[in-house]
Image (tube, rainbow, N blue to C red):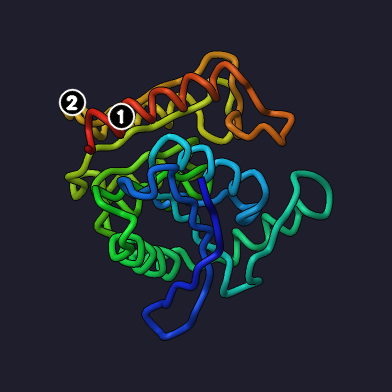
């Protein structure tokens, strides 16, 4: 597995970077890995490398590049406050437009020889959902996507396979919100929804107190199964 930062050109000509992780074989299907509110930090880079080891060409773009390029934040105190400030100032429409160009960049890489899936966490989970609607990905995986209940009006426009992962104890995404997601995609056998007992928001991040190892391992396996059976 090898990894490096690469340049990506936006629609308006601006240049930002993404962390590209390549599988041991050198080629494979693509994953656009979308960060939490903490930037493409050490954890997100490790997740990119994890999926690269699984055989995928993974590109994790710097979503906050227009505000503070390559910002890396922790999960407490001033870093947490700054992360929320960056999230609130993010132009979602512009971010999705940038992600369209990330998808194109990944598809054009010689190492990417298969479908491209978006996969994101929290803010990234929400953006991954929007990528399924607007960015031309072949599938989308959404881990605890913040504000998902407010995006379901566009559910009927999504024609690609989807997979959702929620924590049972997540105060931000309630049981009612999860039921709304399930209702919006009722009858779609290519849309999978999982709720993890005992897990909170951010359960996949091993650098956070919310980390829940059984749920992280199970959701990782389910994601790989989804990518293999629904996308490849």
* Residue at 42% from the left image edge and 77% from the top image edge: 9
Identify the image quadrant of residue 152.
Answer: top left
C-alpha span from label 2 to label 1: 12 Å
* Residue at 43% from the left image edge and 50% from the top image edge: 58
Label 1 Cα neighbours within 10 Å, binned few <14 / some 14-19 / many ≥20: many
Instruction: Decide if residue 15 is in sight here.
Output: yes
Mark number for residue 3? none
* Residue at 20% from the left image edge and 43% from the top image edge: 160
Task: Specify the farthest residue to the bottom.
Answer: 13
- Residue matched to label 2: 189
Local SS, label 2: loop
Instruction: Decide if residue 171 is in sight here.
Output: no
Give the answer, above or below, for where 179 lies relative to 156: above
* Position of residue 68 measured from the top left corner of the image (x, y, whole percent): 66, 71
- The answer to which of 65 and 194 lies nearer the viewer is 65
| CB within 8 Å, label 2 to label 1 | no
Identify the image quadrant of residue 209.
Answer: top right
- Residue matched to label 1: 226
* Residue at 23% from the left image edge and 33% from the top image edge: 185
Q: Earlier in the sequence, mark 2 or mark 1?
A: 2
Local SS, label 1: helix
Label 2 Cα neighbours within 10 Å, binned few <14 / some 14-19 / many ≥20: few
* Position of residue 139 measured from the top left corner of the image (x, y, whole percent): 27, 43
């Amino acid at each position: 597995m090898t990894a490096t930062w690469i340049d990506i050109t936006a629609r308006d000509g601006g240049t930002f970077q993404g962390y590209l992780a390549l599988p041991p074989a050198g080629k494979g299907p693509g994953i656009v890995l979308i960060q939490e509110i903490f930037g493409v930090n050490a954890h997100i880079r490790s997740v990119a490398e994890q999926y690269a080891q699984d055989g995928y060409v993974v590109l994790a773009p710097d979503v906050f590049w227009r505000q503070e390029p390559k910002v890396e934040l922790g999960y407490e105190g001033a870093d947490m406050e700054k992360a929320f400030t960056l999230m609130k100032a993010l132009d979602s429409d512009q971010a999705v437009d940038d992600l369209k160009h990330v998808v194109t960049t990944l598809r054009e890489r010689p190492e990417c020889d298969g479908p491209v899936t978006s996969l994101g966490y929290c803010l990234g989970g929400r953006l991954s959902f929007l990528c399924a609607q607007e960015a031309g990905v072949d599938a989308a995986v959404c881990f605890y996507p913040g504000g998902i209940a407010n995006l379901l009006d566009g559910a009927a426009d999504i024609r690609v396979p989807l997979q959702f992962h929620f924590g049972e104890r997540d105060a931000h995404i309630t049981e009612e919100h999860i039921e709304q997601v399930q209702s919006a995609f009722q009858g779609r056998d290519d849309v999978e929804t999982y709720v993890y007992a005992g897990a909170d928001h951010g359960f996949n991040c091993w650098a956070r107190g919310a980390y829940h190892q059984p749920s992280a391992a199970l959701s990782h396996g389910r994601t790989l199964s989804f990518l293999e059976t629904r996308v490849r």
